[in-house]
Image (cartoon, grey):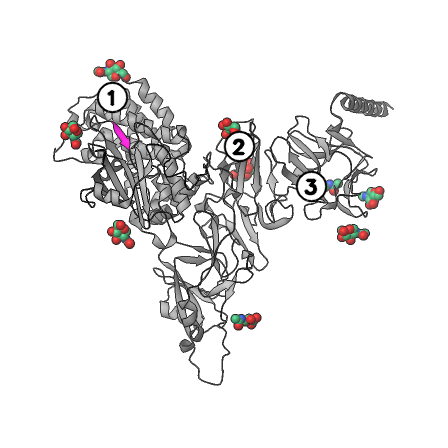
């Protein structure tokens, strides 16, 4: 009796609660059992979360097709977080969402077909409500949860929504469409969170890197709890040790979502509450060509500066305008084998070498340690062999029956040999066919300006010990990322006529004019990977430096718009660009002439040709360079990462005021796949931050690292290349070792060690407290984890605070 009394009491309470909430608040905060909402109702919004962040209802996917979805209400464009019926949209006329008497929430199409329903059958189900975190739940009268949308995500994971063995994210099939696509994010059978491509013909895991062991990717397969979650600060942590974080880590008020996009890339987005726009704050693949299935078979992917698919030589697109169909041979290679005749297959086929390309998957008959002719023979002996990959150094032979997941792969030791029949090949290859077509628009990705996150926990020590050989290769690849990351920023539209005189100062020069000014490029001031620099005098007696650029980006329009940005950069610690010349193949930059040459001349002056830089001058150089970089990173119109900060690029004027040269160049120079020249790679050993080699997107923090190395050089008075012990040590290691030693010494009470560390040419004439501060800054700048490096503007602040 007492029990029943309690029950009646609670029912009454909850009824009253229902009534008051219904009266006091927006009546759309819950849906009670027995109600039904039609697609034809005036409002397509059915429920709103109490905090107003989320709404759910009918979402229009086509003129007369709707899904039942949850979306963010604070973004400027409706962004869907969850969909009940992504593969079966319902008709706009006569379809209903009903909360049935028997307790299941169901979506019913116009003709009565139930396209989706919650698995709540219990008679206890009382309400459906949308929670503040975007979770749609069905609860009983005691608020016990019976069903939740968080258990069946579509392509998006919200903060606090767990990834478990039962949940997976499936990408959309195309941008703006609800349908399930070919990419899945899930816990694989090894307990690892992975990305898999499930194509019509093949299926393959492409993340974490399938070539590496789990531990090489910083993961573990041992924890079988299979759990991952994005917390409200923006940090994702999983049981397999996968960890990544948003660039705005720590800000609890930012709305975020982790979405497996239609292109197979996993991106963490943050919402800017002011303008309602999403920005990517972390992503799995800066180099999108690593994603499988982007281009169809017999084609390969390149990314410069946007994703492109191209057919292999001798192939043509199977279906014009649809890259997923890939390419097919212009001539078939399968020549009927005459088994009676003693035919010599070798004479009927030739192999065409395609350098620096790789295809993932569909290998058969993998044979290690064989010579190239043996590998050829293996392919010849098999009618199904279309081509083979051969790794020279190791003699690894991979015959392939299908060429899929192709990408340009700038490791010179990997080559693809395509099989052609001899008859057809001569005409075929003479014509050099090659389809190139853009498959994604540039604006397919939101701005990456804020990118700061790392996509996996990295270990610099590991990198140093085993991956140094890859460094150069990786740097080539990452340059593209750095360039690309810059490109996605805001970009003013430049009219072709308008750019010739962008400001009265910045102008176009004719090649003749520059020939005259430099007296036919007589006096060379220096030369680097990007080109040689010559001294010149203009008609108005201005002294200039004229740089002949090598390997400029192809698009004229692109070149001009990048130039117009550089042309508008003006800061006393940056070399002023006066103009440019673009005539046929001639691409030149004209900049201010800086009297006293570059910092490296002074630093590596062991013959005593120049007066020794005094402490106050060094301090002033440190401050000036910091100001210049801070301007590039934070203050100028366009966010610019220098990418190659080193003493050679720091020029000194007659008062030894520093001026940074070559900023913005990384955007002007092409890194075409055919023209890789390692000496021209941006970034210089000893100065490049670890993230270059780790394949993470490059931000201003990469410049901060280089700046830290330059600071150490300024104080020590010699080049980083000389810190290496007994010629064996890698220069990166020397930086790390120096920083570690300093860290320990700076913590000491007694700072007398400074006398030994600081350039002996100063004879002890320096300010101890300033030197210690500069070294502290330097040590923090060369931190391996970029999050721990200071920003350039905070470096400026510290340096300014202790100017004498
Ligand atoms: C209802 O309509 C859908 C889509 O038009 C169709 O696939 C389904 O077979 C129909 N069901 C019935 C019972 O007619
Ligand atoms: C409904 O599905 C969820 C997730 O699949 C499960 O945990 C729950 O037990 C199911 N409920 C019922 C009543 O079957
Ligand atoms: C709930 O009721 C509907 C009809 O109102 C019926 O079609 C459905 O099968 C019922 N579900 C269960 C689990 O009884
Ligand atoms: C396994 O992962 C879970 C969830 O992340 C964690 O709580 C647990 O401590 C991990 N177990 C081990 C042995 O690391
Ligand atoms: C959000 O957008 C506003 C207006 O566009 C902008 O001023 C602000 O800097 C942005 N906030 C962040 C954190 O990006
Ligand atoms: C190649 O062979 C396929 C099937 O055997 C055939 O459909 C196709 O037309 C052939 N292509 C050429 C160019 O002969
Ligand atoms: C720097 O310029 C000053 C004045 O023009 C000159 O005396 C000095 O020798 C120059 N130093 C170097 C390193 O070129
Ligand atoms: C790369 O460029 C430099 C200078 O432009 C040149 O000396 C060198 O031979 C080139 N190397 C290759 C491999 O092309
Ligand atoms: C060193 O610089 C500090 C300013 O940071 C100043 O207060 C101090 O007097 C200087 N010491 C010497 C010995 O010049």
Which label's residue is closer to the chain start, 1 or 3? 3
Where does residue 749 sit, x and y in percent of width and height? 28, 19
Q: How many marks?
A: 3
User: Which of 346 and 657 lies nearest the eye of the viewer?
Assistant: 657
Tag in front: 1 or 2: 2
Residue at 41%, 67% (x, y): give it: 429
From the viewer's perspective, tell me whether residue 304 is left or right of residue 22: left
Ligand 1 near label 3 (Cβ, under 8 Å)? Answer: no
Can you tell which mark lies on residue 751? 1
Q: CA distance from mark 1 to mark 3?
A: 69 Å
Which label's residue is closer to the chain start, 1 or 2? 2
Can you tell which mark lies on residue 234? 2
Circle 2: element type: loop
User: Which of 663 and 766 lies nearest the eye of the viewer?
Assistant: 663
The residue under label 3 is 60
> Where the N terminus falls, by quadrant?
top right
Q: What segment is highlighted magenta in the picture?
A: 655-660
């Amino acid at each position: 009796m007492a029990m029943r009394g309690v029950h009646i009491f609670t029912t009454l309470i909850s009824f009253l609660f229902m009534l008051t909430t219904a009266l006091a608040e927006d009546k759309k905060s819950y849906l009670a059992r027995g109600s039904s909402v039609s697609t034809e109702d005036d409002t397509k919004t059915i429920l709103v979360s109490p905090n107003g962040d989320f709404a759910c209802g009918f979402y229009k996917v086509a003129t007369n097709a709707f899904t039942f979805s949850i979306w963010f209400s604070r973004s400027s464009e409706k962004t869907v977080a969850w969909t009940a019926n992504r593969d079966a949209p319902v008709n706009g006329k006569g379809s209903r969402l009903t909360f049935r008497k028997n307790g299941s929430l169901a979506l019913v199409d116009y003709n009565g077909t139930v396209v989706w329903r919650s698995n709540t059958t219990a008679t206890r189900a009382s309400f459906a409500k949308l929670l503040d975190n975007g979770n749609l739940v069905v609860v009983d009268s005691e608020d016990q949860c019976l069903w939740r949308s968080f258990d069946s995500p579509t392509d998006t994971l919200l903060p606090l929504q767990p990834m478990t063995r039962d949940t997976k994210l499936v990408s959309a099939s195309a941008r703006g469409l609800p349908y399930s696509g070919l990419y899945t994010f899930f816990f694989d059978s090894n307990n690892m969170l992975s990305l898999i491509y499930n194509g019509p013909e093949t299926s393959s895991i492409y993340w974490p890197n399938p070539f590496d062991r789990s531990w090489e990717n910083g993961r573990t397969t041992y924890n079988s709890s299979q759990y991952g979650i994005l917390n409200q600060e923006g940090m994702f942590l999983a049981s397999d040790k996968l960890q990544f974080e948003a660039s705005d880590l720590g800000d609890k008020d930012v709305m975020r979502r982790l979405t497996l996009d239609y292109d197979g890339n996993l991106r963490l987005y943050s919402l800017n509450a002011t303008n309602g726009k999403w920005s990517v704050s972390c992503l799995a693949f800066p180099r999108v060509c690593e994603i499988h299935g982007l281009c169809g078979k017999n084609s390969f992917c390149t990314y410069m500066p946007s994703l492109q698919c191209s057919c292999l030589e001798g192939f043509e697109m199977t279906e014009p305008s649809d890259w997923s169909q890939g390419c097919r041979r212009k001539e078939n290679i399968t020549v009927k084998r005459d088994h009676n005749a003693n035919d010599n297959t070798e004479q009927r086929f030739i192999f065409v070498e395609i350098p620096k390309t790789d295809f993932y998957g569909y290998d058969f008959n993998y044979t290690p340690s064989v010579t190239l002719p043996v590998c050829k023979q293996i392919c010849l002996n098999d009618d199904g062999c279309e081509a083979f990959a051969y790794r020279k150094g190791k003699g690894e032979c991979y015959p392939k029956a299908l060429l899929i997941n192709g990408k340009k792969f700038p490791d010179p030791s990997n080559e693809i040999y395509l099989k052609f029949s001899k008859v057809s090949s001569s005409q075929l290859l003479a014509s050099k066919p090659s389809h190139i077509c853009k498959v994604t628009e540039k604006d397919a990705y939101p701005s990456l300006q804020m990118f700061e996150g790392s996509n996996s926990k990295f270990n610099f020590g590991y990198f140093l010990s085993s991956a140094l050989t890859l460094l150069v290769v990786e740097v080539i690849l990452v340059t593209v990322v750095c360039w690309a990351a810059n490109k996605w920023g805001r970009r003013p539209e430049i009219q072709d006529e308008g750019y010739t005189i962008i400001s009265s100062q910045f102008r176009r020069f004719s090649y003749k004019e520059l020939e005259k000014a430099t007296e036919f490029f007589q006096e060379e001031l220096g030369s680097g990977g990007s080109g040689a620099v010559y001294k010149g005098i203009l008609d108005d007696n201005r002294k200039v430096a004229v740089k002949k650029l090598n390997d400029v980006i192809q698009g004229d329009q692109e070149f001009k718009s990048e130039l117009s940005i550089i042309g508008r950069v003006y800061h006393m610690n940056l070399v002023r660009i006066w103009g440019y010349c673009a005539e046929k193949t001639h691409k030149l930059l004209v900049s201010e002439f800086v009297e006293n040459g570059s910092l490296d001349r002074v630093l590596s002056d062991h013959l005593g040709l120049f007066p020794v830089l005094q402490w106050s001058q060094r301090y002033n150089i440190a401050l000036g360079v910091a100001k210049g970089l801070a301007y590039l990173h934070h203050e100028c119109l366009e966010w610019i990462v220098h990418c190659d900060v080193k003493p050679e690029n720091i020029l000194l004027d007659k008062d030894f005021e520093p001026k940074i040269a070559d900023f913005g160049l990384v955007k002007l120079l092409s890194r075409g796949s055919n023209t890789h020249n390692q000496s021209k790679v941006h970034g210089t050993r000893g100065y490049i931050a670890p993230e270059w080699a780790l394949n993470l997107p490059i931000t201003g923090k990469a410049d901060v690292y280089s700046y830290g190395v330059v600071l150490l050089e300024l104080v020590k008075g010699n080049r980083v290349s000389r810190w290496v012990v007994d010629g064996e040590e890698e220069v990166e290691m020397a930086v790390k070792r120096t920083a570690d030693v300093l860290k320990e010494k700076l913590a000491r009470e007694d700072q007398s060690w400074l006398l030994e560390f600081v350039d002996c040419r100063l004879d002890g004439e320096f300010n101890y407290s300033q030197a210690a501060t500069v070294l502290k800054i330097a040590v923090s700048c060369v931190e391996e984890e970029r999050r721990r490096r200071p920003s350039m503007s905070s470096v400026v602040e510290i340096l300014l605070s202790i100017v004498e």
